[in-house]
Every structure is written in structure tokens, then in C-alpha cells.
Image (spheres, rainbow, N blue to C red):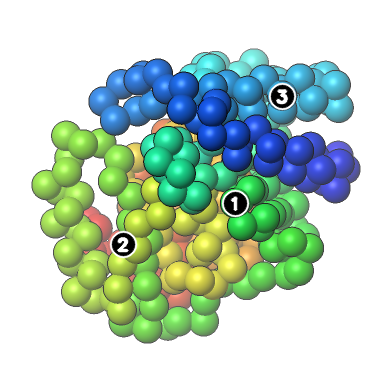
Amino acid sequence: MDIQRIISLVKETQGIIRNREMAAHVREKGVADYVTQVDIAVQDFLKKALYALAPDVQFLGEETGLQRMDTDSYWILDPVDGTTNLMHDYQHSVVSLALCRQKEIVLGIVYDPFHDELFSAVKGEGSFLNGRPVRVSSAKKLSETIIGVGTAKRELSKENFAKFLKVYEHSQDIRRLGSAALELAYTACGRQGGYFEVYLNPWDYAAGMLLVQEAGGKVSDWNGGKLDPSQGSQVAGTNGRVHEELLRLLL
């Protein structure tokens, strides 16, 4: 699989994502869960392009939902991770694309079209930002770094914010970007020491998980268990050095 060809395809979505007219056409899927014409257009474009590139590889995308995969290889796509950001022109929305083979993520791409930052990783080959190698933060404890947080599941907002407070009290500070894939990409390149969220779907975390792992970090559920990229889960991704400290605060 030619990752440079796939990167080129993903970067072709920049014009679609930055189309404010399309971003203004919004449909509500659920409570605080939205889809725009941009989401649909990016998914349709990449689904068609990836099928032409590899017709034997199936497709799992946010706008198709979780479904049983009856093959060993499939793409996992979030066409716009950070749709609410996109609606408000907040400019922290990304395309997240991963390739899963035999329950392992072997390729991950997170593309930020607003800042033209392309994060990529192939299993066993390291993580890169615009072609340059990146590594996770060198922080040895939470007090030496900032931690990203996510606000999934509004019905758990009180529990979530109690955890945010605990982490805030033990770290330099907390941040919320509004895009799980971007949070993991920022963890991979050392801009923050880690990130956690109470629930993410595979298209939210699959590509970012590989970025963090290939940059020397660790990604797990809140019990320290391995993630199944066909299932949603609690997610914690860190530089590895602060992983156990963070998990202790979350349980």
C-alpha cells in the first residue's frame, strides 16, 4: 500500500472541508451530534478513491456507523472529526483515516486542512508530521505536561468534569480541542503529554492510536487493556511515562 498516494488523496479534501457554504448545511443526528454536507462529501470522495485504489478492502466510516466487518482488511474513516468545530469555523477539524488488518491498525493518517499539518504512521516505521519524524513528550509525570480531555456522553458530564478536575490538579493544565484524532496527533508529536475520553468510536481513535504508538507512546482503555479497533471504548493515550499516573486518576 503506497502511503504517499493515500496521503495525496486525503490532502485533496482540503477544499471541501474549507467550504463554508457546505459547512452551513447541518443535520442533527443526536444530542449534540451533527453531520454537515462536508462530512458526506469527504466520505463519498475518499470512499470512491480508496475503492479504486484497493477494491478488496472494505470500509467503516462514521457516516455509515458501526457494522460487522466480514474481512481481515478495512478502512476506518472519520471524514470530519470535529464537526461542531467546523460548524462554527473554529478551525480544529481533521480527516482521520486508518487501515485495519487482522485487528491491528497498520496505517494511520490525521490531516488538519486549516493548518496544513499531515500526521502519518505505518506500523513499525515511526510517526511523522509533514514528512518529519515526531516523538512523544519527554515528561515523566503529569505535573510536567498538559493533558487533553474529551467530553463524550453528556449524560456522564458530572462524572467527566470531576475527572477533569482531578487531572487538572495533578497536571500543568488541561486542554480541549474538540477532535479526538487531533488530540492523539498532538500527543504523538509531543505538544501534550496525553489525552483521555470516556467513549470514542473506532473512527475517532484508530488513526491517532497508531500515531501515538509509533511515536513511542501508549494507548489503552482506562483499565490499561488493549483497544479493539472494531469497537468503541474508553480511551487514554499518553507518552507512556505518565500513563499509569493518569489511569489511576481516571478509575
How many C-alpha atoms fall within 10 Å of the one at disc 2: few (<14), some, or many (≥20)?
Answer: some
Q: Which residue is mark 3?
A: 45
How many C-alpha atoms fall within 10 Å of the one at disc 1: few (<14), some, or many (≥20)?
Answer: some
Residue 21 place in picture, x, y as percent: 54, 28
Residue 86 place in picture, x, y as percent: 47, 39
Q: The residue tagged with tag 2: helix, strand or loop?
A: helix
As drawn, the label of residue 247 is 2
Contact between labelled residues 3 and 2, with CB atoms less than 8 Å apart:
no
**Residue 249, placed above or below residue 48:** below
In the rendered structure, the answer to whether residue 102 lies left or right of residue 173 reads right
**In this view of the protein, can residue 219 be seen by the observer?**
no
The residue shown at (78%, 63%) is 131
In the rendered structure, the answer to whether residue 243 lies left or right of residue 5 reads left
Toward which corner of the image does residue 241 lie, by quadrant? bottom left
As drawn, the label of residue 71 is none
Whichever of labels 2 and 3 marks the residue nearer the N terminus, that label is 3
Q: How many marks?
A: 3
Q: Nearer the viewer, residue 105 or 64?
A: 64
Quarter of the picture holding the C terminus? bottom left
Spatial distance from mark 2 to mark 3, Cα to Cα? Answer: 39 Å
Contact between labelled residues 1 and 3, with CB atoms less than 8 Å apart:
no
Amino acid marked by disc 2: Leu
Spatial distance from mark 3 to mark 1, Cα to Cα? Answer: 19 Å
Whichever of labels 1 and 2 marks the residue nearer the N terminus, that label is 1
Q: Which residue is mark 1?
A: 114
The residue shown at (46%, 22%) is 25
Please state which of the two labelled residues, at mark 1 or mark 2, is closer to the viewer: 1
